Image (spheres, rainbow, N blue to C red):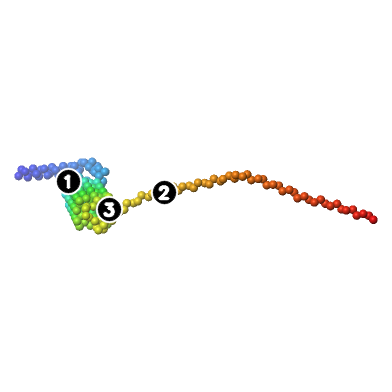
Amino acid sequence: MWRMRWIVIAGLALALASVAYGRFVPRSAVAAPAQQGINQLPLELYILVNQPGPLWLARIDLEGVDLGGARLTGANLRQARLNSANLSDTNLVGANLERANLVSANLTGASLQGASLVSTSLQNSDLRGADLTLANLTGANVTGAKYDITTFWPAGFDPVAGKATLIEPTPTPAPPTATPVPPTATPVPPTATPAPPTPEAPTPVPAAEEPTATPVP
């Protein structure tokens, strides 16, 4: 009897402490660090995902939520709604994501080593740079999921057969080659000095013949 009373008293004290904490502590004091990428979460959700793990988040609705950089190691996210959520650089090592909705989710650089992705919906998700080593993708739908050469798939999984889309790296344009300027031809000075023209001799004018005097008879 006394044990039950102490449990009730402890529960009430915990509830009052939670209310007082949420009432008197400003939200800025418990805001998530900016480098984690989850500083826009509501206070209750931020406190939830920052509890010591592994977390029990089965069937939770996190559609479109920014969880970039969050640490969800070993979390139970079975049948969770994570469509269009930002999970870039999120630690999901060993997490249970069976039958979860990850359609159009951003999983770039996410750590999914050993995660269970059985029958998970990954259509049109972004898996570039994600590490899925030892992950279980049995029955997972990766149609239209983007991946690149930095994506690590589990052994034996064929993303091409799963209709995932390989994103080729953008080639870096080569710098323009400088066009050599052709050398300007230097005119060669004439070696011989041209001789001045020789003046032509004037044509002699014939002298006028004097009239012959006719003798008078």
Q: Is residue 69 above or below residue 101?
A: above
Q: In the figure, is residue 166 to the left or right of 76?
A: right
| Callout 2–callout 1 Cβ contact below 8 Å | no
Q: Position of residue 147 (x, y in %)?
A: 27, 53
At label 1, the amino acid type is Gly
Mark number for residue 94? none
Q: Who's the residue at 36% across and 49% down the image?
A: 172
Residue nearest the observer in this picture, 112 or 169: 169
Q: Name which of mark 2 and mark 1 comes first in the sequence.
A: 1
Q: Pointer 3 and pointer 1: residues touching (CB < 8 Å)?
A: no
Q: For mark 2, what is the residue?
A: 176
Decide: few, some or many residues near mark 3? Use Cα within 10 Å; few <14, some 14-19, many ≥20: many
Q: Of the two numbered discs 3 and 2 on the same chain, state the one appearing first in sequence.
A: 3
104 vs 178, left or right, is left
26 left or right of 200? Answer: left
| Image x and y of residue 111, in percent | 23, 48
Residue 33 in sight here = yes
Q: Which residue is mark 3?
A: 147
Residue beneath label 1, please?
53
Disc 2 is placed on an element classified as loop
